[in-house]
Image: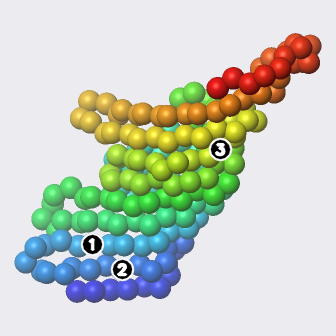
Amino acid sequence: LWMKAPRAKLGNVTGTDIEAIIADFSKQHLTVTADVNGEGRDVRDYLNHSPMKDTIGSALDELDIGGNVRGHLQLGIPLDGEDVIAKGKISLSNNSLYIKPIESTLENLSGSFDFNNGNLTSGPLAANWFGQPVSLNFSTQETKKDYKVNINLNGNWALAKLPWLPDSIKPKLSGNAS
């Protein structure tokens, strides 16, 4: 069985090149693929109203992505009641990212990350944090007890531009901190 739709709305998210395939009925497995495009909040809301709610959806609950998000989704849906496998890639271009646990926002975020259910792995990402450039990458691992996050963050910040320093001190500072 093979079905194809060139375009559909998935909530407020636009899906294109959507395919649903059962390659072999004896294996009882449905594969659905789609390219998606929409506002970050809408993509998160779509994932939270799908079979991916307890995996990638719950990971994105702690993040608020602003701006347009593109991605590719692949769902492996066993027809015998086993767990759904959700894989894909999300691409960011000049987005904002509010990180709820630390109440902080990255601006001008660009790059991509892959997901396999709740496990995420990014490639190199670039952003501005507190008005200064940073590069980073991250990975997450979903376990039965907790959710592990590994973040590598690099920056070379001008000390006088740190926003939390009093204005009276800034002219007296020079140099960078990395």
Q: In the image, 113: left or right of 95? A: left
Residue 125 percent across, percent down from the top left? 56, 47
Mark 3: which amino acid?
A: Ala
Q: What residue is shown with label 3?
A: 127
Quarter containing the N terminus: bottom left
Tag 2 near tag 1, CB within 8 Å: yes
What is the CA distance from the residue labelled 1 to the residue labelled 3? Answer: 35 Å
Q: Decide which of tag 2 and tag 3 comes sooner along the chain.
A: 2
Numbered mark located on residue 19 in the image = 2
Of discs 1 and 3, which sits in the foreground? 3
Viewer-side residue, 177 vs 7: 177
Distance from Cα at disc 2 to Cα at disc 1: 8 Å
Tell me the distance, in whole angstroms, between the alpha carbons under discs 2 and 3: 34 Å
Count neighbours of disc 1 (C-alpha within 10 A) and say few if under 14, some if 14 to 19, many if 20 or more. Answer: some
Q: Position of residue 170 (x, y in %)?
A: 87, 18
Residue located at (55% from left, 40% from top): 136
The structure residue drawn at horizontal position 50% and vertical position 68%, both measured from the top left corner, is: 36
